[in-house]
Image (tube, rainbow, N blue to C red):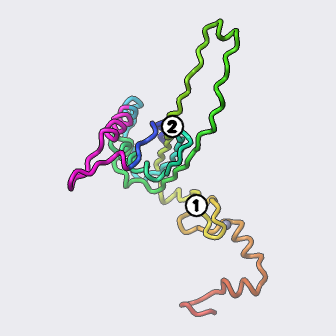
Amino acid sequence: MLKLKLPYPPTINHYWRHVGQRVLISKKGREYRADVSGYLHRKGVQPLEGPLSVDIELHMPDRRRRDIDNVLKAMLDALQWGGAFLDDNQIVRLAIEKIVAEKKAPPKRRTKAEIAAGVQRTADKPKGQAIVWIAEVDVERHAHANRICLQCHQSFESKGPTHRICRDCKHKQSKMPPSVVEAGSGKRRNGVPM
Ligand SMILES: [Zn+2]
């Protein structure tokens, strides 16, 4: 598993540039890619192989409204280019969570003693960052993952891609009055009720 702390990625509009028919990576995009690649190199990261699961915590640089989807492509492209994996088509699961910056507290005043001691106030300029976990997954054996329940739309620990109803909803279903159960989930064979 890899845990990476990346700078806040440029949006898709700032990463690529369309020049006539061609699509080029912008200066901002190249800088970001170089940052990510340098960081991976310093960490001695070797490209992960096989199916991967990627979890991203996206820490907003400030409280401006932002979409999280339009930074994904740049981030994944930079990770591939920097050698975190061979190809982003290896990714079989992808989760991204937006972490909104806390409202900034007013700067603390230094005490007289601190001023006398020459303590400087740290200028904490918000920068934003993306924390990325990349894990190799054995798709066959580790189908377990959080998925959205098709009934209550809550995230639950699912046993595989076809397990889409959470335990609570299953339980509720089984407790429904018999008439409802019969009407809703009567067994069928070749489409014909049995
Ligand atoms: Zn449910």
Query: Residue 36 lies in what quarter of the image?
Result: top left
**Quadrant of the rendered image holding ligand 1:** bottom right
Could you tell me which secondary element the residue under label 1 belongs to?
strand
Residue at image position (65%, 61%) is 154
Q: Residue 84's spot in the image, x, y percent?
A: 39, 42
Q: Nearest the camera: 173 or 67?
A: 67
* Residue 49 shows up from this direction: no
**The disc labelled 1 sits on which kind of residue?**
Arg
Looking at the image, which residue is at 65% across and 29% down?
A: 106
State the image coordinates of residue 124 (x, y, percent, origin top left): 56, 27
Q: Which residue is mark 2?
A: 128
Residue closest to the eye, 137 or 171: 171
Quadrant location of the C terminus?
Answer: bottom right
User: For the magenta stretch, what is the residue range?
Assistant: 13-38
User: Would you say 178 lies left or right of 59 here?
Assistant: right
Say above or below: 134 vs 124.
below
**Front in this rendered view, residue 185 or 71:** 71
The 10 Å Cα crowd at callout 1, few under 14, some 14 to 19, many 20 or more, is some
Mark 2 or mark 1, earlier in chain = 2
Relative to residue 38, is residue 16 depicted above or below? Answer: below
**Left or right side of 112 for 100:** left
**Callout 2 amino acid:** Gly
The label shown at residue 147 is 1
Q: CA distance from mark 2 to mark 1?
A: 27 Å
Is 85 included in the stretch rendered in magenta? no
- Horizontal side of 78 relative to 112 (left or right) equals left
- Expressed as whole percent of the image width and height from the top left, the position of residue 17 reads 29, 48
Mark 2 falls on what kind of element? loop
Q: Residue at x 53, y 33 (%)?
A: 126
Instruction: For the residues labelled 2 and 1, say whether their Cβ atoms are less than 8 Å apart.
Output: no
